[in-house]
Amino acid sequence: MNRSEILEQRKIIYNSLTAYKLNNAVRGIEDLQKYTSVANFSTELDNIKLEYKYLLTYFQNGTCDPQRESIFRNFIQRLFTITDKIICEDRTKNDVNLYYSYKRIKQKSNTTLSFLLNKYSQAISKQNMLESNDNIITAEIERTEVEIFNYIWAIFPINAQDIESINDIFNNENYPTYFKELIISAIMLSLFEYYDESLFSILAKLYNSQNTSIAIKALTAIVLVAILHKDRMMMSQQISDIFYVMAENDNFTQDIKNILLQLIKSWNTEKITQKMENEILPNLMKVSPDFVKKFKSDNSFIENADFEGNPEWKNLFDDDKLTKKIEEFNKMQLDGSDVFAGTFSHLKTFPFFNDISNWFLPFHQGHSLLHNTLQANEIKSFNTMLDSKFLCDSDKYSFVASLGLVPQSQRNSMLAQIEEQNNAIKELKSSEIQINEAVNRQSVINNQLQNYYRFFKFYPRRSEFIDPFLNVFDIDVIKWLTPVNCVNDILTLIGEYCLQNNLYNEAATYLESIDENQKNDNPVLYQKIGFCYQNIGKYSKAINEYEKYELLANKDFWTLKHLAICYKAQKQVDKALQCYLDAETLSPENINILLNIGHCYLELKQHKNALNYYYKVYYLGNSGAKALRPIAWCLFLMKDFDTSDTYYNKILSTNPSATDYLNYGHLKFAKQEIEDAISMYNHSIKELKGSIEKFNETYLADIDCLISIGVSKYDISIMLDSLNSKQ
């Protein structure tokens, strides 16, 4: 099997296991062994088959076995692990992927983690005995940190001795905190490649660490691993027990909220512009029926405000605790926004970043990059900036490395400016500390996820890694990670965030998953869900949600207007008209509503009613110009050609469009003023920059209208041929 075939076979086996089809999974594993020539696990597989056969026999005999489910789950987990071990062994032989290259190096060296940690401990002891940093010892420490990181990253399959050694890292008080935090990232990266429950359990224990930074970084890694391996982990009773224990931590729910929101924020950064261009604007255009294009030059059918959120939403939530939390989160996100991701993406090519571990290394003042790049007085000057939480660790290293390329004269100039601004920076830092003391856990999450974002987005060989920022967070993961009584709060927070950032599909998914009772208690949620569906073109669903809202709350202008838009999109013009008429009672002189009532009557061929509303708009002062085109067209359809002619002359005296000339040409054609009609049509072609194709398209779209007011279908064709022959 080649690499793609192996991965496809793994997918088949995984699907069988998550569907509880053990026999299918066993057959798939046997095929995998045969085609990869990895037979080391045949005995273990045979044992599982035999044990499963016994379980089936006991089941068939009606034997009561309270452990049956637990045994069955254990079979699944063991088969997952066997599959991974076979694939890992096969790919380690010749796969050029960086992960397997490190595994081959590890196998040839016969180095143990215990040996590397002993070497690391000795180097730290030497450094501690010296009064100042020794470059040779510092270099040895940093090389060993890289080796340990790579070892743990490529640790699968894991043995008991290595698990014990990893635990020792976090229990050793002599190891610096930054090193322990680095190892958390190595564990996470290893679990991304191959999941192992014993390794994951180490992260879970770390969440109870007295060190806030270690605890939060461990939980951040836990969430990312859980998202990637959710199907497998949700089947494990041991993992369920682990999350139950973690949930007893008073900070757990808030920490989960913070992590999920920051992940959503990082995930959607690149998508907002695409959403606007690819979904929102095209959907706005789809709502407009063909006949309204007759008036498109003044955009009288739809206003941009028709696709904006309800201005009352904020007021509805002013006294709601949840809204205050959302506002608090928004403030934290503003303070910790990843605004430098694009800037620092260009500063990740320094040799420092050749080692994967350095992408995850917490910034610390003792690193050789700092001392080899800057002089002692420069370090002192830059310390205020580098100590700030304004930049993530990865960007701080980029900044220091980039200073090495700056000529000394320019660096001196920079230092002078920084010295002048240091007081202001210190004040900023002081206020930052005051804020971060209250939201320190959030700050750690932001920093860590920004570090991860840079690696998975900017590392040159990033295609060899699973990018956790590409994964959409499904509802099952949120419900699984979160205590039951907090699920609705988290779904609401994430849904609100997506809604505020125009991620309507995602917002609808989260908000609709909120418990029905909570939505009934807070019906504005139905309104918001309807708004989401409207903006992604699912108008039937939008109508359904808006109607749910109206059953629980009084009719309001905003909902009526948006219901009308959805009905129009569904070609239910009569229902749209009723919504607009109801809206008129709430805002009798709203120009947009009056015009749309006219448009509905016009589409229903109730021309007299339509004309009455257009006249009402016309006589409402400054807005009269908006009614000129629909009045002229309505009079044309009513065969009141002379009055229509008067209005078209007013239109042509302003700033006529290609459509205006076309419509006036139709009027002249209907009056049998052929020369004038041809002249108007030629003006229309000219406004279309001479495109006869575009003109033909718009002309042909009006055939039914021309026939309805008495123009011969033969004359219509003759006119078109006449115009085309002159082009």
Image: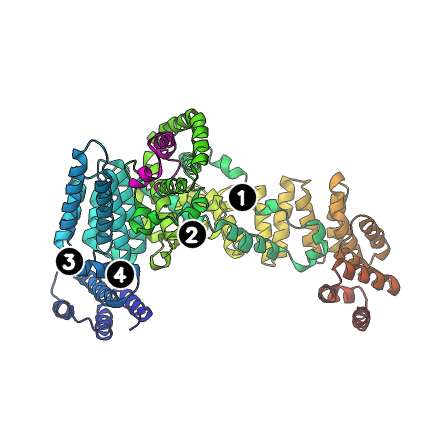
Residue 683 seen in render: yes
Front residue of this view, candidates 594 and 274: 274
Q: Which mark is residue 110?
A: 3
Circle 4: element type:
helix
What separation in Å lies between label 2 and label 1 (alpha carbons)? Answer: 17 Å
- Where residue 181 sits in the image (x, y, percent)? 26, 42
Could you tell me the amino acid type at mark 4?
Ser
Magenta stretch in the rendered image: 368-393
Q: Nearer the viewer, mark 1 or mark 3?
A: 3
Classify 85 as above or below 420.
below
Could you tell me the amino acid type at mark 2?
Thr
Q: Earlier in the sequence, mark 2 or mark 1?
A: 1
Q: Which mark is residue 309?
A: 1
- Name the quadrant containing residue 678: bottom right
Could you tell me the amino acid type at mark 3?
Asn
Q: Which mark is residue 285?
A: none
Q: Nearer the viewer, mark 4 or mark 2?
A: 4
Circle 1: element type:
loop
- Where residue 623 sits in the image (x, y, percent)? 73, 42
Q: Which mark is residue 509?
A: 2
